[in-house]
Amino acid sequence: MIDPDGEQRVLITGGAGFLGSHLADRLLAEGFDVLCVDNFFTGSKRNIQHLLQHPRFELLRHDVTFPLYVEVDRIYNLACPASPIHYQRDPVQTAKTSINGAINMLGLAKRVRATILQASTSEVYGDPEIHPQREEYWGRVNPIGIRSCYDEGKRAAETLFFDYHRQHGLDIRVLRIFNTYGPRMDPADGRVVSNFIVQALNGEPLTIYGSGLQTRSFCYVSDLVDAMVRFMHADGAPTGPINVGNPAEFTMLELAETVIRLTGSSSTIEHRDLPHDDPRQRRPDITVAREQLDWAPTIALEEGLVPTIEYFRERLGQAEPSRASGAGMGARDGA
Ligand SMILES: NC(=O)c1ccc[n+]([C@@H]2O[C@H](COP(=O)([O-])OP(=O)(O)OC[C@H]3O[C@@H](n4cnc5c(N)ncnc54)[C@H](O)[C@@H]3O)[C@@H](O)[C@H]2O)c1
């Protein structure tokens, strides 16, 4: 447990999203006051419904591309659609959310002298030549592709964080998040874990793009949230960037077969063409997180898939479409 110790007012942008809502749960349990700011582009009230009556929880509908004036001690900047289906639906808004959103939240942090954490991403490494990825690797990113609004938006946000740190002495934390999964993922967001589970539960074929030999690593949400909170409160105010994810690497085929087995589904596997700019492999080197945050993931893939499958079982049949959903589903990977 972390003692809020007089610095208890926390802002979470994107707090009604998948990760943001779990972070809100954790911070409320630790005794913090949580202000959740969200424009519900991909997030949902369903994710925070259980918090609306909590005496230390507040919700503000607001788009971070516009300035925000509130009094807080710490900011977790998570606002940004994270799956390709969502962020490619309005790429200009995606870039604005990352870049203008970062400028606005950094401006707020500067004004109120708050510590600010950026939810950055493994996508800053692009399609990497170095494997696994270490923080000092600068990445191999296409600046003009269909994923660029997200990848380059997040890279520009990192630049802004470090310039505010150097120029204005801001207390920053830059966290590079690798694929994370768990309950409250949007069933229609096209991310590979949610897609496979939904397809398996519906008895549909699991769609794999390309050969299925491309690899990803999957971190369970509670592990990720734990790393976020540890980083925010770490001794010595490390700026990062710090990779956080689960280094255990799986091919898409292995993931598909595991999901079919755990759901007890009779689904088959179907191959489709690989989309543009899909990275072939991704795995975090988490040495820095181990050393600086004393953090390592604790939940193995199969263990985390069980509650995730349970969540989707309950969700199916009561879907509430988010503003950004509506595109066709495919087993793409993102964020
Ligand atoms: N889940 C992952 O695997 C992963 C991996 C790497 C990075 N991240 C990053 O973590 C953050 C949270 O991701 P998530 O998986 O919870 O995605 P999510 O889509 O569930 O959550 C994003 C939230 O941001 C909100 N939002 C989007 N644009 C906004 C705007 N302009 N103003 C206010 N709110 C806005 C959405 O409505 C949503 O609630 C994102 O910044 C994402 O890039 C996630």
Image (cartoon, grey):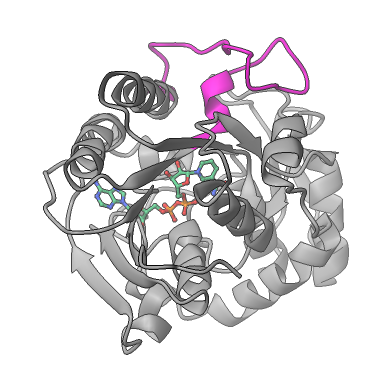
Residue beneath the point at 29% across and 25% down: 164
In this rendering, would 238 be left or right of 309? left
Q: Is residue 163 magenta?
A: no
Vertically, is 278 above or below 6?
above
Q: Is residue 130 magenta?
A: yes
Count of marks overlaid on the render: 0
Vertically, is 53 above or below 192?
below
Q: Is residue 182 visible?
A: yes
* x, y percent for residue 205: 72, 54
Choose between 178 and 237: the one closer to the eye.
237
Residue beneath the point at 51% across and 39% down: 237
Choose between 78 and 328: the one closer to the eye.
78
* x, y percent for residue 263: 80, 70
* x, y percent for residue 68: 13, 50
Residue beneath the point at 46% across and 48% down: 328
In this rendering, would 71 be left or right of 205? left
Choose between 25 and 164: the one closer to the eye.
164
* x, y percent for residue 62: 17, 57
Image quadrant where residue 215 sits: top right
Choose between 306 and 76: the one closer to the eye.
76
Q: Is residue 265 visible?
A: no
Image quadrant where residue 60 sits: bottom left
Residue segment shown in magenta: 120-149
Image quadrant where residue 49 sits: bottom left
Please, what is the dominant secondary structure of the magenta stretch?
A: loop
Residue beneath the point at 49% across and 63% down: 23
